[in-house]
Image (cartoon, rainbow, N blue to C red):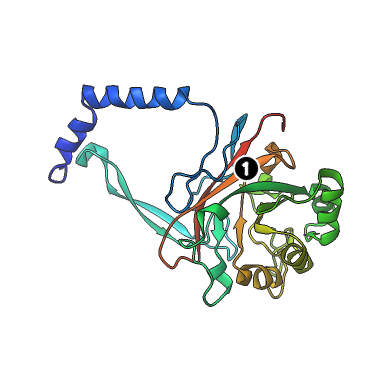
Amino acid sequence: MCVPGCQEVIEKRLSRRGFLKAVAATAALTAAPASIAAARDGKAGPIIKKPVARIVDLTHTLVPDFPTFFGGSQFESDPLFEFETDGFNMNTWTLVEHTGTHMDAPLHFSVDQDSAAEVPIEKLVVPLAIVDIREKAEANPDAQVTPDDLRAWEAEHGPLPRGSCVAMLSGWADKVDGPGFRNADADGLLHFPGFHVEAADFLIEERDVHGVAVDTLSLDYGPSPDFAFHFRWLPTNRWGLEAVANLDRLPPVGTTMVAAVSKVHAATGGPTRVLAFVHPGRG
Protein backbone atom coordinates (compact mmCIF):
# COMPACT_ATOMS: atom_id res chain seq x y z
CA MET A 1 0.00 0.00 0.00
CA CYS A 2 1.05 3.59 -0.54
CA VAL A 3 2.32 5.36 2.59
CA PRO A 4 -0.05 8.01 4.08
CA GLY A 5 -0.35 11.04 1.83
CA CYS A 6 1.38 9.30 -1.07
CA GLN A 7 -1.68 9.03 -3.31
CA GLU A 8 -2.59 12.67 -2.87
CA VAL A 9 0.95 13.77 -3.74
CA ILE A 10 1.04 11.59 -6.86
CA GLU A 11 -2.33 12.91 -8.06
CA LYS A 12 -1.20 16.48 -7.49
CA ARG A 13 2.04 15.89 -9.38
CA LEU A 14 0.16 14.40 -12.32
CA SER A 15 -2.61 17.01 -12.43
CA ARG A 16 -3.25 18.89 -15.64
CA ARG A 17 -2.27 22.19 -14.05
CA GLY A 18 1.02 20.78 -12.77
CA PHE A 19 1.76 19.22 -16.14
CA LEU A 20 1.16 22.49 -17.99
CA LYS A 21 3.37 24.38 -15.57
CA ALA A 22 6.17 21.88 -16.13
CA VAL A 23 5.84 22.23 -19.90
CA ALA A 24 5.95 26.03 -19.66
CA ALA A 25 9.03 25.94 -17.43
CA THR A 26 10.82 23.56 -19.78
CA ALA A 27 10.03 25.77 -22.76
CA ALA A 28 11.41 28.81 -20.97
CA LEU A 29 14.65 27.01 -20.20
CA THR A 30 14.98 25.73 -23.76
CA ALA A 31 14.50 29.22 -25.17
CA ALA A 32 17.24 30.71 -23.00
CA PRO A 33 20.71 31.23 -24.55
CA ALA A 34 23.00 28.24 -24.07
CA SER A 35 25.38 29.29 -21.33
CA ILE A 36 26.87 28.29 -18.01
CA ALA A 37 26.24 30.26 -14.83
CA ALA A 38 27.16 29.28 -11.28
CA ALA A 39 26.29 31.16 -8.10
CA ARG A 40 29.05 32.11 -5.66
CA ASP A 41 28.23 31.34 -2.03
CA GLY A 42 24.51 31.33 -2.76
CA LYS A 43 24.56 34.79 -4.34
CA ALA A 44 23.40 35.66 -7.82
CA GLY A 45 26.72 36.75 -9.31
CA PRO A 46 27.95 34.39 -12.04
CA ILE A 47 31.35 32.77 -11.92
CA ILE A 48 31.31 31.58 -15.53
CA LYS A 49 29.02 32.54 -18.37
CA LYS A 50 30.09 31.39 -21.81
CA PRO A 51 28.30 30.03 -24.89
CA VAL A 52 28.12 26.25 -24.98
CA ALA A 53 28.37 24.15 -28.14
CA ARG A 54 27.78 20.74 -26.53
CA ILE A 55 27.81 18.96 -23.17
CA VAL A 56 29.63 15.69 -22.47
CA ASP A 57 28.95 13.46 -19.47
CA LEU A 58 32.22 12.35 -17.89
CA THR A 59 30.48 9.99 -15.46
CA HIS A 60 30.31 6.20 -15.55
CA THR A 61 27.00 4.64 -14.56
CA LEU A 62 27.42 3.13 -11.10
CA VAL A 63 26.48 -0.56 -10.85
CA PRO A 64 27.15 -3.12 -8.08
CA ASP A 65 29.98 -4.77 -10.00
CA PHE A 66 31.78 -1.52 -10.90
CA PRO A 67 35.55 -2.15 -10.55
CA THR A 68 37.09 -1.06 -7.25
CA PHE A 69 40.62 -0.55 -6.01
CA PHE A 70 40.31 -3.30 -3.41
CA GLY A 71 38.50 -5.71 -5.70
CA GLY A 72 35.19 -6.29 -3.92
CA SER A 73 31.83 -4.68 -4.60
CA GLN A 74 31.38 -1.31 -2.89
CA PHE A 75 27.79 -0.55 -3.94
CA GLU A 76 24.46 -2.24 -3.35
CA SER A 77 20.98 -1.00 -4.25
CA ASP A 78 17.89 -2.67 -2.77
CA PRO A 79 14.24 -1.72 -3.31
CA LEU A 80 12.63 0.00 -0.33
CA PHE A 81 9.35 0.92 -2.04
CA GLU A 82 8.09 -0.25 -5.44
CA PHE A 83 5.61 1.42 -7.77
CA GLU A 84 3.45 -1.66 -8.28
CA THR A 85 2.69 -2.00 -4.56
CA ASP A 86 3.46 1.41 -3.04
CA GLY A 87 2.75 3.90 -5.83
CA PHE A 88 6.33 5.11 -6.06
CA ASN A 89 9.91 3.80 -6.29
CA MET A 90 12.66 4.25 -3.73
CA ASN A 91 15.88 2.30 -3.11
CA THR A 92 18.22 1.83 -0.19
CA TRP A 93 21.91 2.27 -1.08
CA THR A 94 24.89 0.75 0.68
CA LEU A 95 27.88 2.61 -0.68
CA VAL A 96 31.58 3.16 0.00
CA GLU A 97 32.37 6.85 -0.66
CA HIS A 98 35.14 6.11 -3.13
CA THR A 99 33.22 4.09 -5.71
CA GLY A 100 32.55 4.68 -9.40
CA THR A 101 33.22 8.14 -10.79
CA HIS A 102 33.97 9.99 -7.58
CA MET A 103 35.90 12.77 -5.90
CA ASP A 104 38.80 12.41 -3.50
CA ALA A 105 38.19 15.39 -1.21
CA PRO A 106 41.20 16.98 0.52
CA LEU A 107 40.08 15.35 3.79
CA HIS A 108 40.68 11.89 2.27
CA PHE A 109 44.46 12.17 2.88
CA SER A 110 44.68 14.89 5.51
CA VAL A 111 43.68 15.66 9.09
CA ASP A 112 41.58 18.80 8.74
CA GLN A 113 41.34 19.94 5.11
CA ASP A 114 38.03 20.36 3.26
CA SER A 115 35.51 17.56 3.24
CA ALA A 116 33.48 16.98 0.08
CA ALA A 117 30.75 19.21 1.49
CA GLU A 118 33.22 22.01 2.22
CA VAL A 119 34.94 22.35 -1.17
CA PRO A 120 33.92 25.85 -2.37
CA ILE A 121 31.63 25.76 -5.39
CA GLU A 122 33.91 28.15 -7.30
CA LYS A 123 36.50 25.36 -7.19
CA LEU A 124 34.03 22.86 -8.67
CA VAL A 125 33.25 24.84 -11.86
CA VAL A 126 36.62 25.08 -13.56
CA PRO A 127 38.48 25.09 -16.89
CA LEU A 128 39.52 21.62 -17.98
CA ALA A 129 42.92 20.77 -19.48
CA ILE A 130 43.32 17.23 -20.84
CA VAL A 131 46.78 15.67 -21.05
CA ASP A 132 46.75 12.76 -23.49
CA ILE A 133 49.19 9.98 -22.53
CA ARG A 134 47.41 7.16 -24.39
CA GLU A 135 50.44 6.28 -26.48
CA LYS A 136 52.66 6.08 -23.42
CA ALA A 137 50.06 4.08 -21.48
CA GLU A 138 49.62 1.59 -24.31
CA ALA A 139 53.35 0.87 -24.21
CA ASN A 140 53.50 0.78 -20.41
CA PRO A 141 50.42 0.31 -18.17
CA ASP A 142 52.39 1.81 -15.27
CA ALA A 143 52.92 5.10 -17.14
CA GLN A 144 52.71 8.32 -15.15
CA VAL A 145 51.97 11.95 -15.97
CA THR A 146 55.23 13.83 -15.35
CA PRO A 147 56.25 17.50 -15.42
CA ASP A 148 57.65 16.85 -18.90
CA ASP A 149 54.18 15.81 -20.08
CA LEU A 150 52.72 18.98 -18.61
CA ARG A 151 55.37 21.20 -20.18
CA ALA A 152 54.83 19.50 -23.54
CA TRP A 153 51.10 20.20 -23.23
CA GLU A 154 51.81 23.87 -22.51
CA ALA A 155 54.21 24.11 -25.44
CA GLU A 156 51.34 23.10 -27.73
CA HIS A 157 48.31 24.69 -26.03
CA GLY A 158 49.62 27.53 -23.89
CA PRO A 159 49.77 27.86 -20.10
CA LEU A 160 47.51 25.65 -18.03
CA PRO A 161 44.39 27.72 -17.26
CA ARG A 162 44.29 29.29 -13.82
CA GLY A 163 42.10 27.42 -11.37
CA SER A 164 41.76 24.49 -13.74
CA CYS A 165 41.42 20.75 -13.44
CA VAL A 166 44.20 18.83 -15.18
CA ALA A 167 42.91 15.49 -16.46
CA MET A 168 44.92 12.46 -17.51
CA LEU A 169 43.59 10.74 -20.63
CA SER A 170 45.15 7.28 -20.65
CA GLY A 171 42.44 5.39 -22.55
CA TRP A 172 41.70 3.29 -19.46
CA ALA A 173 37.98 4.16 -19.47
CA ASP A 174 37.56 1.79 -22.42
CA LYS A 175 38.54 -1.10 -20.13
CA VAL A 176 35.94 -0.41 -17.42
CA ASP A 177 33.75 -3.43 -18.22
CA GLY A 178 36.53 -5.99 -17.90
CA PRO A 179 39.43 -7.13 -15.69
CA GLY A 180 41.84 -4.89 -17.60
CA PHE A 181 40.57 -1.86 -15.69
CA ARG A 182 42.14 -3.10 -12.44
CA ASN A 183 44.76 -5.04 -14.41
CA ALA A 184 45.91 -7.12 -11.45
CA ASP A 185 48.89 -9.41 -11.92
CA ALA A 186 49.33 -12.90 -10.45
CA ASP A 187 50.38 -11.37 -7.11
CA GLY A 188 47.36 -9.07 -6.99
CA LEU A 189 49.37 -5.93 -7.80
CA LEU A 190 47.41 -3.45 -9.92
CA HIS A 191 48.79 -1.90 -13.08
CA PHE A 192 47.31 1.29 -14.55
CA PRO A 193 48.50 4.86 -15.19
CA GLY A 194 48.38 7.80 -12.80
CA PHE A 195 50.08 11.06 -11.80
CA HIS A 196 53.72 11.14 -10.69
CA VAL A 197 54.45 12.93 -7.41
CA GLU A 198 56.76 15.30 -9.30
CA ALA A 199 53.74 16.40 -11.33
CA ALA A 200 52.09 17.32 -8.04
CA ASP A 201 55.12 19.42 -7.09
CA PHE A 202 55.01 21.18 -10.46
CA LEU A 203 51.27 21.93 -10.31
CA ILE A 204 51.37 23.07 -6.67
CA GLU A 205 54.52 25.18 -6.79
CA GLU A 206 54.51 26.53 -10.34
CA ARG A 207 50.88 26.57 -11.49
CA ASP A 208 47.47 27.58 -10.11
CA VAL A 209 45.38 24.41 -10.37
CA HIS A 210 42.38 23.38 -8.24
CA GLY A 211 42.09 19.70 -9.12
CA VAL A 212 43.19 16.73 -11.17
CA ALA A 213 41.26 13.88 -12.77
CA VAL A 214 42.12 10.39 -13.99
CA ASP A 215 40.28 7.78 -16.06
CA THR A 216 41.68 5.03 -13.79
CA LEU A 217 41.00 3.81 -10.24
CA SER A 218 43.54 6.05 -8.51
CA LEU A 219 45.32 9.37 -8.79
CA ASP A 220 48.52 7.37 -8.19
CA TYR A 221 49.59 4.75 -10.69
CA GLY A 222 48.49 1.19 -9.93
CA PRO A 223 51.61 -0.32 -8.30
CA SER A 224 52.35 2.77 -6.20
CA PRO A 225 53.79 1.56 -2.85
CA ASP A 226 53.04 4.74 -0.91
CA PHE A 227 50.27 6.84 -2.59
CA ALA A 228 52.85 9.59 -2.97
CA PHE A 229 50.70 11.76 -5.23
CA HIS A 230 47.69 11.54 -2.89
CA PHE A 231 49.79 12.51 0.13
CA ARG A 232 51.39 15.45 -1.71
CA TRP A 233 48.27 16.74 -3.47
CA LEU A 234 45.24 16.42 -1.20
CA PRO A 235 46.72 17.99 1.99
CA THR A 236 47.18 21.25 0.03
CA ASN A 237 43.35 21.50 -0.06
CA ARG A 238 43.14 20.39 -3.68
CA TRP A 239 40.86 17.62 -4.92
CA GLY A 240 41.01 14.75 -7.38
CA LEU A 241 38.49 12.87 -9.51
CA GLU A 242 38.89 9.16 -10.20
CA ALA A 243 37.31 6.86 -12.80
CA VAL A 244 36.10 9.63 -15.11
CA ALA A 245 34.70 8.73 -18.53
CA ASN A 246 34.65 10.13 -22.08
CA LEU A 247 37.72 12.36 -21.91
CA ASP A 248 38.48 11.24 -25.46
CA ARG A 249 35.36 13.11 -26.62
CA LEU A 250 36.80 16.47 -25.56
CA PRO A 251 39.41 18.87 -26.93
CA PRO A 252 42.61 19.37 -24.89
CA VAL A 253 41.53 22.89 -23.91
CA GLY A 254 38.42 25.06 -24.23
CA THR A 255 36.09 23.14 -21.92
CA THR A 256 34.49 24.05 -18.60
CA MET A 257 34.00 21.18 -16.17
CA VAL A 258 31.44 20.92 -13.36
CA ALA A 259 32.26 18.42 -10.60
CA ALA A 260 28.96 18.00 -8.74
CA VAL A 261 30.16 15.97 -5.77
CA SER A 262 27.62 14.74 -3.24
CA LYS A 263 27.34 17.25 -0.39
CA VAL A 264 27.57 14.98 2.64
CA HIS A 265 28.82 16.15 6.04
CA ALA A 266 32.42 15.11 6.76
CA ALA A 267 32.62 13.05 3.56
CA THR A 268 36.14 12.19 2.42
CA GLY A 269 34.78 11.98 -1.11
CA GLY A 270 31.72 10.77 -2.88
CA PRO A 271 30.01 9.84 -6.14
CA THR A 272 30.22 12.78 -8.52
CA ARG A 273 28.30 13.71 -11.66
CA VAL A 274 31.00 15.26 -13.83
CA LEU A 275 29.91 17.34 -16.82
CA ALA A 276 32.02 19.06 -19.46
CA PHE A 277 30.73 22.08 -21.38
CA VAL A 278 32.53 22.51 -24.69
CA HIS A 279 32.65 26.09 -25.92
CA PRO A 280 32.11 27.00 -29.60
CA GLY A 281 35.11 26.62 -31.84
CA ARG A 282 36.76 24.11 -29.51
CA GLY A 283 35.58 20.91 -31.19
On screen, residue 194 versus residue 77, left or right, reads right
Q: Is residue 161 left or right of residue 10?
A: right
Q: Residue furthest left?
A: 4
**What x and y, as percent, mark residue 177?**
61, 47
Q: Name the residue rendered at 53%, 61% in the picture.
A: 98
Query: Height in image: 54 above or below 37?
Result: above
Tell me where residue 264 sits by quadrant. Answer: bottom left
Residue occupying image coordinates x 65% and y 69%: 230
User: Foreground: 186 or 4?
Assistant: 4
User: Callout 1 environment at 10 Å: few (<14), some (14 to 19), or many (20+)?
Assistant: many
Image quarter (top left, top right, bottom left or bottom right) of the C terminus: top right
Is 134 left or right of 122, judged from the image as shown? right
Q: Does the image show residue 101?
A: no
Q: How many marks?
A: 1
Secondary structure at badge 1 equals strand
The single residue placed furthest to the bottom in the displayed view is: 111
12 vs 79, left or right, is left
Q: Quadrant of residue 50?
A: top right
Instruction: State the residue position of label 1.
Output: 256
Vertical comparison of 2 with 186: above or below:
above
**Residue 219: % across, % down:** 67, 62
* Residue 195 or residue 266, whichever sits in front: 266
Q: How far across and how far down the image is residue 189, in percent?
A: 70, 68
Could you say where residue 15 lies in the image, as x and y percent from the top left? 21, 26
Q: Amino acid at mark 1?
A: Thr
Residue 174 seen:
yes
Looking at the rendered image, the quarter that the N terminus falls into is: top left
Residue 68 or 134: which is nearer the viewer? 134
